């Protein structure tokens, strides 16, 4: 087991290690004002990166390199945009060199990270990252609470279903076969992960989640994530049924436990961000809950992704 990739692939693990070391050196040499630090998250940050095996037997990296960028508290929007622009040439150069997307996330302040500390994205980062440049993660995240995997909020299950449902709809409309296969696989994984979150049984490691869920299709999707190939683990229709079943269970859990209750605060969030009340039947529900309810109807009917729904997803993602 490597530090960055899943399974035995020492050459690919060295490639990631060498690449992020050089990327870190380039970031340091750029002397970006206001930049506190950069860490590698995602699959390669937590040792679960995928390695694709090509028909000729050669191997290549598969997932994106996801770098998280932290700037000083109090940074203005203009200062954060300057940091983003300074890192953009590095991302572009290394994307071309490695043949995968090298992404620097929009810069975040420590305050913003603390504000979002209940989010699955932040908690997964805290439980699996690699220091790249500037201050270490120990310093950058020292005031951010690390949660137990089983204590993730129900809304993160909803958010995950919304994101994977969007991917499912985009996959159906895409002419790119590999994009479709990849998003179908992510949909199966997301549906299983959402069930585990809603049940209070989530685990930080993918293989542990597969054991906890006990569903063969999910286990196959985890194996595909580690060693992707041209053919997927299932077709779009099976992924659709898997996602719908998970969405129904998660929403029922929210109703039963009261996690999906309405509030004036949630109504205000929607109105402020969307500048409209929207459907009165959904007023007071959390924005991602409203989006999931509508998305379920679209997926059930096999309709195309409505532009208005896609816009709402992007706003509240």
Image: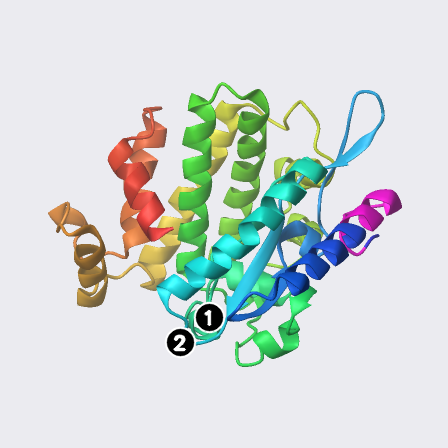
Task: Inspect the magenta stretch and tell me whether residue 242 lies in it.
Answer: no
Q: In percent of the image, x 46 and y 35: which residue is there?
A: 167
Left of 209 or right of it: where is 244?
Answer: left
For residue 167, above or below residue 301 = below
**Residue to which mark 2 is pinned:** 74
- Residue that sits furthest to the front in the current view: 30
Measure the alpha-carbon separation of dots 2 and 1: 8 Å
Question: Would residue 261 be found to the left or right of residue 85 on screen?
Answer: left
Residue situated in front as seen by the camera: 27 or 137:
27
Is 4 within the magenta?
A: yes
Q: Is residue 28 left or right of residue 280?
A: right
Which residue is tagged 1? 109
Q: Residue at x 59, y 62 (%)?
A: 125
- x, y percent for residue 109: 46, 70
Circle 1 crowding by C-alpha within 10 Å: few under 14, some 14–19, many from 20: some
Q: Circles 2 and 1: CB distance less than 8 Å?
A: yes
Which numbered disc, 2 or 1, marks the residue closer to the eye?
2
Q: Which residue sits at x=34%, y=44%?
A: 313
């Amino acid at each position: 087991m490597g530090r960055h990739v899943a399974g035995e692939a020492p050459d690919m693990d060295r490639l990631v290690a060498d690449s992020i070391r050089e990327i870190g050196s380039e970031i340091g040499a750029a002397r970006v004002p206001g930049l506190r630090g950069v860490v590698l998250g995602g699959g390669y940050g937590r040792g679960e990166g995928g390695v694709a095996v090509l028909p000729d037997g050669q191997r290549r990296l598969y997932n994106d390199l996801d770098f998280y960028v932290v700037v000083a508290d109090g940074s203005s929007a203009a200062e954060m945009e300057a940091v983003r622009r300074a890192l953009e040439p590095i991302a572009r150069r290394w994307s071309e060199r490695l043949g995968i997307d090298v992404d620097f996330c929009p810069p975040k302040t420590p305050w913003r990270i603390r504000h979002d500390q209940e989010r699955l994205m932040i908690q997964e980062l805290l439980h699996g990252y690699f220091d790249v440049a500037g201050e270490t993660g120990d310093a950058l995240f020292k005031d951010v609470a690390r949660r137990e995997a089983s204590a993730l909020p129900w809304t993160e299950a909803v958010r995950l279903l919304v994101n994977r449902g969007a991917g499912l709809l985009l996959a159906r409309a895409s002419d790119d076969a590999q994009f479709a296969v990849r998003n179908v696989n992510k949909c199966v994984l997301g549906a299983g992960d959402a069930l585990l979150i809603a049940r209070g049984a989530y685990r930080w490691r993918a293989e542990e989640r597969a054991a906890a869920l006990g569903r063969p299709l999910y286990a196959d999707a985890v194996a595909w994530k580690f060693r992707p190939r041209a053919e997927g683990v299932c077709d779009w229709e099976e992924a659709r049924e898997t996602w719908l079943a998970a969405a129904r269970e998660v929403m029922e859990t929210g109703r039963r436990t009261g996690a999906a209750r309405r509030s004036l605060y949630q109504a205000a969030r929607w109105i402020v961000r969307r500048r409209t009340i929207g459907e009165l039947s959904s007023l007071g529900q959390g924005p991602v809950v409203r989006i999931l309810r509508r998305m379920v109807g679209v997926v059930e009917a096999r309709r195309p992704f409505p532009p208005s729904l896609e816009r709402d997803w992007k706003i509240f993602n």
